[in-house]
Image: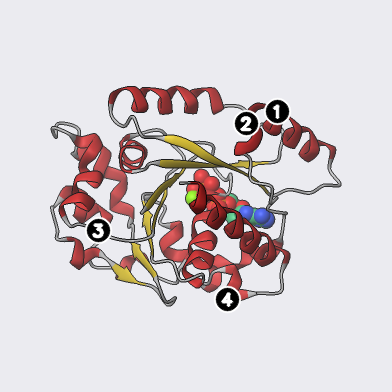
């Protein structure tokens, strides 16, 4: 079972788009996949066609009210792809759990207790380094960081690394960055190539070869509640995420 946190506290770096679309193509490649929406904005939940107000039990209930996992887990419209959905009240979970002992490892313990078995558990983190993200980092073994190819892309990465280092030292020694994904890439723009060069220099072979190009179809798909491979399989976005998933599947042989 691969457990991957998709994280970057910088907003709009392509986390949710990546989680939904790699989830879709991994499921299509016959892997059993669980996506966990840790963001109160519920974008992954909406992107998969759910309307959060209509969801009765969400990640919030699982973390705060000890609601059983089977009441929270949803099947999506796609075979092999399940979801633990989010609703807006997740925004108050960080405060409500502040006095809870072991609050950084609630999610990890729930998955262990329920003997959750998937080929992939992929977590969409909110754009912050708070308690919800910490829960993802203690549950995960791997970290994927999507980096948007633009001027401020590298700002904030130092803070992210510090957080990862502390979690690794104190809570989860298994944790490793295993993939950097360059998103919203346009090779005609100098700034994109500059960021690409810096990212490659720093992360070396951890950077996936596939570039996720800027593609308006990727931005349109969420409002239709569909993954790109379902919404517009002929688009660049579909092509890029399908290629990225080929690389992710290749990593399986190295584990
Ligand atoms: N390759 C792309 N080309 C064009 N638009 C994209 C691409 N990837 C993502 N987008 C759009 O950019 C916006 C931000 O992407 P996304 O929601 O995936 O980022 P995020 O990191 O999850 O954001 P947040 O930090 O708010 O959770 C969205 O409107 C999304 O549809
Ligand atoms: Mg998001």
Distance, label 4 to label 3, CA atoms, is 27 Å
Count neighbours of disc 4 (C-alpha within 10 A) and say few if under 14, some if 14 to 19, many if 20 or more.
Answer: some
To which residue does mark 3 refer? 116
Picture quarter with the N terminus: bottom left
Which disc, if any, is residue 201? 1
CB-based contact (under 8 Å), mark 2 and mark 4: no
| For the residues bearing labels 2 and 3, Cβ distance under 8 angstroms | no
Q: Quadrant of residue 96?
A: top left
- Tell me the residue at 46%/71% (across/down): 30
Residue 102 appears in the figure: yes
* Residue behind label 3 places its C-beta within 8 angstroms of ligand 2: no
Name which of mark 4 and mark 3 comes first in the sequence: 3
Q: In 3D space, how far apart are the residues under numbered discs 1 and 2 (Cα atoms)? A: 6 Å
Which quadrant of the view contains residue 189? Answer: top right
Q: Label 4: which residue?
A: 230
Could you tell which of marks 1 and 4 lies nearer the N-terminus?
Answer: 1
All told, the count of numbered labels is 4
């Amino acid at each position: 079972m691969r457990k991957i946190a998709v994280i970057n506290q910088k907003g709009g770096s392509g986390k949710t788009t990546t989680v939904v679309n790699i989830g879709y193509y991994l499921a299509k490649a016959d892997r059993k996949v669980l996506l966990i929406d840790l963001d109160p904005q519920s974008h992954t939940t909406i992107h998969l066609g759910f309307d959060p107000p209509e969801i009765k039990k969400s990640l919030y209930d699982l973390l705060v009210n000890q609601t059983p996992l089977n009441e929270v887990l949803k099947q999506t419209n796609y075979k092999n792809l399940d979801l633990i959905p989010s609703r807006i009240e997740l925004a108050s979970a960080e405060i409500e759990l502040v006095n809870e002992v072991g609050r950084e490892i609630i999610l990890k313990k729930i998955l262990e207790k329920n003997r959750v078995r998937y080929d992939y558990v992929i977590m969409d983190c909110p754009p912050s380094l708070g308690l919800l993200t910490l829960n993802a980092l203690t549950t995960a073994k791997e970290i994927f960081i999507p980096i948007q190819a633009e001027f401020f892309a590298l700002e904030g990465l130092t803070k992210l690394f510090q957080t990862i280092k502390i979690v690794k030292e104190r809570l989860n020694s298994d944790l490793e960055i295993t993939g950097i994904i360059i998103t919203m890439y346009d090779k005609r723009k100098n700034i994109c190539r500059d960021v690409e060069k810096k990212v490659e220099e720093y992360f070396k072979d951890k950077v996936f070869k596939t570039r996720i190009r800027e593609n308006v179809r990727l931005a349109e798909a969420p409002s239709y509640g569909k993954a790109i491979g379902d919404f517009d399989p002929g688009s660049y976005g579909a092509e890029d995420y399908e290629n990225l998933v080929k690389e992710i599947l290749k990593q399986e042989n190295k584990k």
